[in-house]
Amino acid sequence: MSKVIVVGGGIGGLAAAAALHQRGWDVEVLEQAAELAEVGAGISLWSNALRALDVIGLGERVRARAVTEVAGGIRNSKGEWLSRADVAAIRDRYGLPVLLHRADLLEILRAAVPESALRTGVTVRAAHPDGTVTHSAGTSAGNLIVGADGVRSVVRRAVCGEITPRYAGYTAWRMVVTPTAPVGELGETWGRGERFGIAALADGRVYCFATANLPAGTRTEGLAELRRRFGAWHDPIPALLDAAAPAAVLQHDIYTLPPLKTFVAERIALLGDAAHAMTPNLGQGACQAIEDAVVLARSEGDPARYDRLRRPRAQLIARRSDRIGAVAQLSWPPAVAARDAVLRLTPASAQVKALGSVLDWTP
């Protein structure tokens, strides 16, 4: 039986472990944290990721814990619509995305991996192309190493040397809120160098996210900062901020990777953020990690084939996400006015068609 060492117990790592275990591999997952847990935030999974999850028998379990995300589109800070999503056309052509809590997705993936395969509290120090991994508990060896250890991956050093992640120019806040009144239409609101997004969760809570152009490493007062920036924006944003708990607000700077020349080296394959960390503007970060996992498993652990199938697509989507973020985070008033005018004039059908290269994917 072939053995795989998966470094990283997040969404991508557990998806890879589940997919390879299903194909008959002996799996060992090394996770630095003391327990497998996800932050308090929501996650959207588009139809491409759901198809990948269907391949490993987890699609229906995810759908059962999720709500169909019917984002209304994009508004300005006054609440005026700049762009309305053609939900019916998206549903008919690609299928609608679903939204669930990240912890629920992690739980589903973890249940698909043997408990004996999970090793927490293990810090990986180095990976080697011959299939060995040195870590705080000793050494592990396998026929394949999967580097799923995030944007600051240790495993990636064995593939590409030192790669410095790039700061995207903006920070992000995330939180899950229990609203005190029904929330109306969902979607994103774009301002000048700032954005606020609202999405529903299946249990009646609401997932909120926000961004702002700030120097890298700027720490803010969390909820107080959000209220200062967005408290005068259109409803229901002020009410959601009033209902939020300060401890629920998470802040993370957004980092990406430059395009890697390869995702693989001998017995090592990178996936997810370790291979192609991208901005969240297309909602494809986790989706691409899940695609990676399923393609790697169906490639029977052949790193070269995996690289050939995955690198062009993942890097294309990362570039598109970067471009969208650059437009969404515009702050110079004339540029913002031009952007908003273009959004108003762009037909919904063009937006639906543009999603094709991202969502028309099957394993």
Image (cartoon, rainbow, N blue to C red):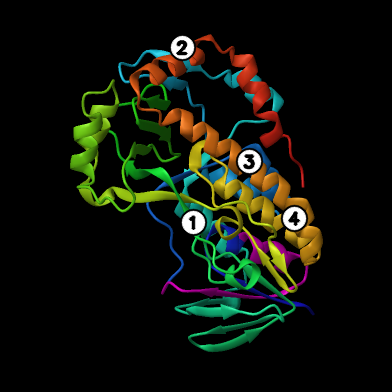
Q: CA distance from mark 2 to mark 4?
A: 40 Å
Give SS at disc 4.
helix
Amino acid type shown at disc 1: Pro
Camera-nearest label, 2 or 4: 2
**Numbered disc total:** 4
| Relative vertical location of residue 276 with respect to residue 123 in this rendering, above or below | above
Give SS at disc 1.
loop
Do callouts 1 and 2 mark residues in contact (Cβ within 8 Å)?
A: no
- Give coordinates of residue 203: x percent, y percent: 41, 41
The answer to which of marks 2 and 4 sits earlier in the sequence is 4
Amino acid type shown at disc 3: Ile
Q: CA distance from mark 3 to mark 1?
A: 17 Å
Q: CA distance from mark 4 to mark 3?
A: 16 Å
**What residue range appears in magenta?**
15-34
Q: Which residue is mark 2?
A: 341
Q: Quadrant of residue 294?
A: bottom right
Do callouts 2 and 4 mark residues in contact (Cβ within 8 Å)?
A: no
The answer to which of marks 1 and 4 sits earlier in the sequence is 1
Give SS at disc 3.
helix
Q: Which residue is mark 1?
A: 165
Do callouts 4 and 3 mark residues in contact (Cβ within 8 Å)?
A: no
Q: How crowded is the residue under tag 1: few (<14 C-alpha within 10 Å), some, or many (20+)? A: some
The answer to which of marks 4 and 3 sits earlier in the sequence is 4
Indicate which disc residue 317 carries: 3
- Give coordinates of residue 145: x percent, y percent: 67, 73
44 drawn magenta: no
25 drawn magenta: yes
